[in-house]
Each structure stands twice: as C-alpha cells, then as structure tokens.
Image: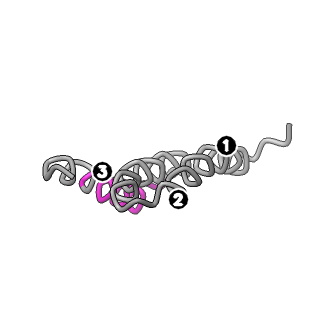
Amino acid sequence: MIWYLQLIFGLMAIGGATVAAIWKNPFDKLIAIGIIGAGIMPFLAEKGYLDVVILVSLIIPVSTIILLRIVRGDES
C-alpha cells in the first residue's frame, strides 16, 4: 500500500479510538467506532482478508442501527 494512504488510514483509526475514549455522548462514540472500522478495513483488504472485510462491512451498519435504538431508549 502507498505509504501516505497507510498514514491516512492509520490516523483515522487512531483518531477514532481517541475520540471514542474522550467523548461522553453514546451517539458520538458509535460514530467514532465507525471511523475506527473505516480506518482498519483497508489494512485487512491489503492482507487479503476480503471475507473479513465483507463481513465487517455488513455487520457494522446493522449493529450500529440496533445500538442506536438501544441507546436512545425508545420503546416504539
């Protein structure tokens, strides 16, 4: 992988982890966890773990929707 892309994706993952650790709002934490996933996926694809990338790209949106409904606490 090109070195500057590695730097950008690595900074995305580190930045997402830092934001998730600092922010207190659960909605913001979920967004930060999505940013971590977006930063890690290119590294998994480069190593050839395309099945893991496909699985993660399908699980993250579904779990985010479920977690947002749980965090909001709405009964509808």
Asked which quadrant contains residue 56, the reply is bottom right
Task: Confirm or deny contact between disc 2 and disc 3 (CB under 8 A).
Answer: no
For numbered disc 3, what is the local secondary structure?
Answer: helix
Give the mark nearest the N terminus, 2 or 3.
Answer: 3
The magenta segment is 11-24
Q: What's the mark number on residue 52?
A: 2
Q: Relative to the observer, which residue lies in front, 40 or 54?
A: 54
Task: Name which residue type carries label 1.
Answer: Ile
Tell me where residue 25 appears, x and y as whole percent: 51, 50
Give the mark nearest the N terminus, 1 or 3.
Answer: 3
Q: Relative to the observer, which residue lies in front, 29 or 39?
A: 39
- Image point 71% across, 48% down: which residue? 66
- Look at the image and say whether residue 13 sits in the magenta stretch: yes
Task: Name which residue type carries label 2.
Answer: Val
Q: What's the mark number on residue 40?
A: none
* Crowding near the residue tagged with mark 1, few <14, some 14–19, many ≥20 C-alpha atoms within 10 Å: few
- Image point 60% across, 43% down: which residue? 61
What kind of secondary structure does the magenta stretch mostly adopt?
Answer: helix
Task: Confirm or deny contact between disc 2 and disc 1 (CB under 8 A).
Answer: no
For numbered disc 1, what is the local secondary structure?
Answer: helix
Furthest residue toward left: 3
The span from disc 1 to disc 3 (Cα, nearest Å) is: 22 Å
Q: Which residue is mark 3?
A: 12
The span from disc 2 to disc 3 (Cα, nearest Å) is: 19 Å
- Look at the image and say whether residue 67 sits in the magenta stretch: no
Tell me where residue 20 appears, x and y as whole percent: 42, 57
Q: Which residue is mark 1?
A: 65
The span from disc 2 to disc 1 (Cα, nearest Å) is: 20 Å
- Image point 39% across, 54% down: which residue? 45
